[in-house]
Image (tube, rainbow, N blue to C red):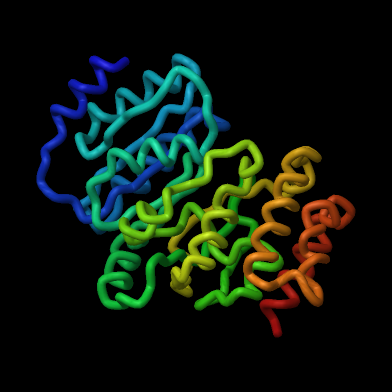
């Protein structure tokens, strides 16, 4: 694969790019997911980007599909490994090859709406005080759009207590803040919560984020997905919460209760969660 990767890199036109979009792929749910995700980036109104896709040890069919994407559009840069290493590792490998001033995340089962990159780029160009920005999103599953998820416009420390105040695949960062922070924490204990960890770490280091209050993204969430997480991943998240809440001075008086949130959610029916979210929106 090394020789082929070298040929791909030699083909890339080395004109400066403004945005590097990064995405890790590992045997997505259906064969259509990858097409939908990629086409949503290629169809952006903002055109000056590169799209780095890391194949994280997918099966032969998916790997061949990723290679074919490069032939479709030379802005797509396929890289990868025959072994599976996890999302954080994949994103760090993507980061090593980025050339853009801004780094935008994307996930293989989500869809970016056409003006997403354009609006985030303009926001960060005009608001130098912010280091990254996310957006709100419509939520969908195999049955279609079933809800909306919003995040606070300017998250504070307390906004980290319930869950990440940013929808990870919607976020665009300034390149330097990611590089200076060392990128994603590719450790076993950050599996399934690498996004939560990096946002808390960046916040602790003085970084400042913002959420554009528009639905610029379609976010894939199965209604029952959170309840099927294994005990191991819930334990990992509880540890990440405790470690970071302690550093952020959030453990007392009630932060320690939020450390248990991954386990408490086991006993809360999805319909109750949806009801509470809808009540908050109506207030």
Question: How many numbered discs, if any?
Answer: 0
Q: Position of residue 172 (x, y in %)?
A: 38, 59
Locate residue 173: give its quadrant. Answer: bottom left
Residue at image location 23% in from the left, 15% down from the top: 3
In this rendering, the answer to whether 25 lies above or below 246 is: above
Locate residue 77: give its quadrant. Answer: top left
Residue at image location 36% in from the left, 35% down from the top: 53
Quarter of the image for the C terminus: give it.
bottom right
Q: Is residue 102 left or right of residue 148?
A: left
Q: Is residue 113 left or right of residue 97?
A: right
Locate residue 280: give its quadrant. Answer: bottom right
Q: Position of residue 216 (x, y in %)?
A: 43, 63
Residue at image location 48% in from the left, 74% down from the top: 213
Pick the front one: 152 or 209: 209
Quarter of the image for the N terminus: give it.
top left
Pick the front one: 199 or 11: 199
Q: Position of residue 44 (x, y in %)?
A: 29, 54
Q: Is residue 92 left or right of residue 224?
A: left
Q: Position of residue 265 (x, y in %)?
A: 82, 55
In this rendering, the answer to whether 79 lies above or below 116 is: above
């Amino acid at each position: 694969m090394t020789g082929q990767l070298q040929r791909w890199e030699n083909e890339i036109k080395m004109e400066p790019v403004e945005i590097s979009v990064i995405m890790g792929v590992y045997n997505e749910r259906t064969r259509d997911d990858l097409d939908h995700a990629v086409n949503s980036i290629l169809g952006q109104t903002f055109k000056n980007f590169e799209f780095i896709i890391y194949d994280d040890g997918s099966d032969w069919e998916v790997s061949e599909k990723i290679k074919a994407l490069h032939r479709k559009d030379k802005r797509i840069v396929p890289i990868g490994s025959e072994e599976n290493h996890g999302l954080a590792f994949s994103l760090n490998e993507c980061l090593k090859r980025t050339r853009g001033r801004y780094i935008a995340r994307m996930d293989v089962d989500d869809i970016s709406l056409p003006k997403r990159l354009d609006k985030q780029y303009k926001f960060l160009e005009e608001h130098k005080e912010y280091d990254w920005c996310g957006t709100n999103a419509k939520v969908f599953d195999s049955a279609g759009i079933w809800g909306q998820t919003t995040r606070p416009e300017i998250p504070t420390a307390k906004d980290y207590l319930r869950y990440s105040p940013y929808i990870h695949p919607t976020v665009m960062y300034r390149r330097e803040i990611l590089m200076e922070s060392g990128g994603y924490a590719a450790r076993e204990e950050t599996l399934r919560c690498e996004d939560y960890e990096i946002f808390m770490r960046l916040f602790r280091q003085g970084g400042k984020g913002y959420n554009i209050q528009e639905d610029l993204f379609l976010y894939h969430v199965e209604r029952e997905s959170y309840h099927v997480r294994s005990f191991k991943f819930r334990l990992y998240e509880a540890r990440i919460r405790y470690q970071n809440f302690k550093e952020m001075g959030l453990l007392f008086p009630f932060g320690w209760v939020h450390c248990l949130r991954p386990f408490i959610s086991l006993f809360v029916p999805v319909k109750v969660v949806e009801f509470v979210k809808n009540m908050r929106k109506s207030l």
